[in-house]
Amino acid sequence: MNCKDEIKKPVWVQVDIEKKIDTLMSKMTLEEKIGQTVMYSSETDITGPVLDKDYLNYIRNGQVGAIFNGTGVAFTRKLQRIAVEETRLGIPLLFGFDVIHGYKTIFPIPLGESCSWDLELMEKTARIAAIEASAVGLHWTFAPMVDISRDPRWGRIAEGAGEDVYLASLIARARVRGFQGNLSDDNTILACAKHFAGYGAVQAGRDYHTVDMSEIRLRNTHLPPFKAALDEGVATFMTAFNELNGVPATGNKYLLNDILKKEWGFNGFVVTDYTSINEMIAHGYAKDLKHAGELAMNAGADMDMQGGVYKNYMMQSIGEEKIDIERLDEAVRGILRMKFQLGLFDDPYKYCDENREKTLVLSQEHLEVAKDAAMKSVVLLKNKNNVLPLKTTQKIALIGPLADDEHDIVGTWGAHGHRDGQAVSVKEGFEAKKVNFKYAKGCEISGGNKDGFKEAIGIAKRSDVVVMVMGESEDMSGEAASRTNIKLPGLQQELIATIKAIGKPIVLVLFNGRPLDFSWEDENVHAILETWHSGTSGGHAITEVLFGAYNPSGKLTVSFPRNVGQIPIFYNQKNTGRPLSAQNPNLEYASKYLDVDNSPLYSFGYGLSYTTFEYSDAKLSSDILTSTTPITASVTVTNTGDYDGEEVVQLYVRDLVGSITRPVKELKGFKKIYLKKGESKMVEFEITTDDLKFYNNKSEYINEEGEYELFIAGSSNHEFTNKFHLKK
């Protein structure tokens, strides 16, 4: 059947989208307008506590504008036909889904992929996610998550790009480009910047919790990635579950209206997170559902996800003049604008090609990109005595609860990526490479059963080296998965200690969705490979890294604490009036801990390689920077080791004196370069006055005359080497 034959041509075909919207809205009843602001889940949803089984009738009555969690060409076409063929105006539906790091071909979790520092790669993986999602009838993803978080207790840190504002903003733009492309094409989808705003700063790292922060922190840390997504043309925003400074984000007019729509000029639409309108009652901000709907709509929330509040109460609220019809029209206009930009009015079935669904989803080409992404996301944290890379001739003991895992390797928000068992485990990667190994599970991820210890000890004794694959299950990170104990769960540490007693070198391969507290493991194993939850092709990718077919190049985008008591810990903190310094490390009355060093176990930007890199001849083109005369900072990087490899060259700057206190260092540039062994390359960065701007305590975006320091290195843990002066 040719879907093109099913199209019901709209009667308002005009050249200009805004004129098309005007024409359509002039035909709409109040109830039909309200319907565009309503989103319900389809019956394929397995998580929703307020799933309304009457959603099909709502579609027929023009009372629903969007559906989420319904996938597959046949299913989405069925629902779209109802909307287009059986309603008075034939307004097409939007279909949305949580395509966070892939649809069926799953890439590393976003936190892991950010450690590649490869913007082109991240745009490509988002592009593939959009191709697969659109091939099954979807128009919209609830990604990217651009929340900045410095608290690994918070499970949703897995969905973001780490702790740094500059890098996260660039990644936000790359992912928006990848998802959206040219929206008029049939293989692109709407992106959604979430969660607006401050969600990554929830108190105690507990999901859905309170956020209270200064305007300076909000504007300098948490808003910039959202602004970057908007500047890249992101189509939609999603509200956050948390309150911000006493007002729930879904009813926060300052966020949604004053900043997003007025100050920033956003003309897409804002969707609430799942039932977050309803939850304003539990927050103590709304007295009932009708009141909650009024607060949300008047604040700037244009579409109600799953709560049913707009559908059930908005007509009454408008009748009582609690919501202006003009405000409703603004919301509807934003929603219709996106449907027109997608081309759904011209061809509501443009995403209904069964051949695309069969040939594009989980294609070999996509799997190869997934493998490449997983390899580039791996971070080598330790490599004592150059235990890595391994040799295929070695006798290897492969041990651990995640060594033969095809499920948890996909990670949180795996979409439809692990339901058919198509993900590759590390064990399968070893088998494909024809490695000389023996496998034993040893223990479960959690729990206290030691029955597997004996088999693990046996194969370890007969091995040359032990590879232990440990970490978290996929449901230990992500939404509603906060943890106060972020050590390896269960008996995993005890199993490592037992194997260590045998005396063989141990390589620890980590699966996790957050930074872990593994200070003990760091002291007791020879090598540590941080692989995150690496996705569909993870087993092949990890194997390639372990055996040196790919030289690890990942760098951390989030600091790893020495223990949970240091949290929150991040590289670009501010100084104190009594800082602990390298020059005076024993100062008694200084800002320090009595029981642990101030520094993280592993800092932002850190990551080893099988080769080594030397930085030399750092210099500036001038020590004076003006608005018309940029400065070029340069350094020579040399591969001084025995392997070809990639290095992420990072530029950091410090504003020494400001009208408000400034961070001790800030990332302001990076370049990923490839060097053959023995090769040298000069790397240059241009510094402009715009690079030094920040929000002051008057919410003015400014830079200030004064002295600045900089360094260029392979991580944030480095001393400053050069100075310059910004002159007005």
Image (tube, rainbow, N blue to C red):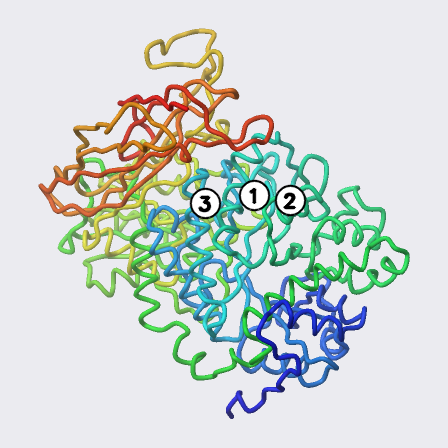
Residue on which the image places disc 2: 208
Q: Residue furthest front?
A: 628
Q: Label 2: how many residues lie within 10 Å, few (<14), some (14-19) or many (20+)?
A: some
Q: Which mark is residue 169?
A: 3
Q: Name the kind of residue labelled 1 in the image.
A: Ser
Earlier along the polypeptide chain: callout 3 or callout 1? 3
Cα–Cα gap, marks 3 and 1: 25 Å
Residue at far top of view = 588
Q: Residues within 10 Å of mark 3 (few under 14, many from 20)?
A: many
Is 573 on the left or on the right of 625, as rendered? right
Q: Position of residue 520 (x, y in %)?
A: 37, 32
Q: Tag on residue 482? A: 1
Residue 417 in view of the camera: no
The quarter holding residue 367 reads bottom left
Circle nearer the N terminus (3, 2): 3
The first of marks 1 and 2 along the sequence is 2
Is mark 1 in CB contact (under 8 Å) with mark 2?
Answer: no
Q: Which tag is nearer the camera, tag 1 or tag 2?
A: 2
Q: Distance between the residues labelled 3 and 2?
A: 23 Å
Name the residue rendered at 62%, 47% in the picture. Answer: 260
Q: Nearer the viewer, residue 504 or 258?
A: 258
Against 297, residue 421 (above or below) is below
Give the total number of marks visible in the rendering.
3
Left or right: where 484 falls relative to 36? left
**What's under tag 2, amino acid-wise?**
Tyr
Element at label 2: loop
> As drawn, is 703 to the left or to the right of 32?
left
- Pair 3/2: label in front: 3
